[in-house]
Image (cartoon, rainbow, N blue to C red):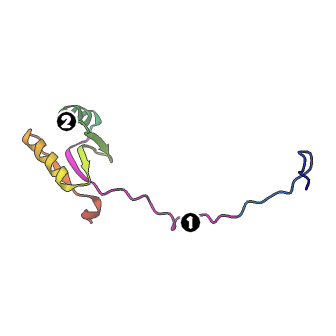
Amino acid sequence: MSVPSDSEPRPAVEPPEVPRPTPADVQPEQQPELWRVRVGSFAVREEAETALQKLREYAPEAFVVSDGVYRLQAGAFIERERAEALAESLAERGLAPEVIPPRSSQR
């Protein structure tokens, strides 16, 4: 048995054809359905950022989401009870939180 040298031409090997998924075959990654605790909505980003800094005294994981409106969110939880507990704690501090159910339960 001889081994071809580098100077000898080698036959081209075509890789096997692998079927490509069509858009109908591709499923979006499953994201957990979350209960959200919203504390406010703002038209101006700077106002939302100012409120965020104050909210982080009570909810360090708070953040702002935007869909054209800047929404101040104190947290997002898989368990409804945890969202409600945070909302209750924020209400005791004089805030007006709103517990937002998962999108699937809003349909």
Quadrant housing residue 32: bottom left
60 in magenta: no
Q: CA distance from mark 1 to mark 2?
A: 45 Å
Q: Report which residue position mark 1 lands on.
A: 22
Badge 1: few (under 14), some or many (20 or more) residues near its Cα, within 10 Å?
A: few
Q: Residue at x 25, y 64 (%)?
A: 105
Name which residue type carries label 2.
Leu
Q: Report which residue position mark 2 lands on.
A: 55
Quadrant housing residue 41: top left
Q: Is residue 88 left or right of residue 1?
A: left
Predominant secondary structure in magenta?
A: loop
Q: What quarter of the picture does the C terminus occupy? A: bottom left
Q: Is residue 94 left or right of residue 48?
A: left
Q: Is residue 69 left or right of residue 82?
A: right
Name which residue type carries label 1.
Thr
Q: Residue at x 65, y 64 (%)?
A: 18
- Pinpoint residue 78: horizontal percent, then vertical percent: 26, 54
Segment colored magenta: 17-43
The answer to which of 26 and 52 lies nearer the viewer is 26
- Pinpoint residue 19: horizontal percent, then vertical percent: 63, 66
**Residue projecting furthest to the bottom:** 24
Q: What quarter of the picture does the N terminus occupy? A: bottom right
Q: Residue at x 32, y 44 (%)?
A: 66
The answer to which of 107 and 83 lies nearer the viewer is 83
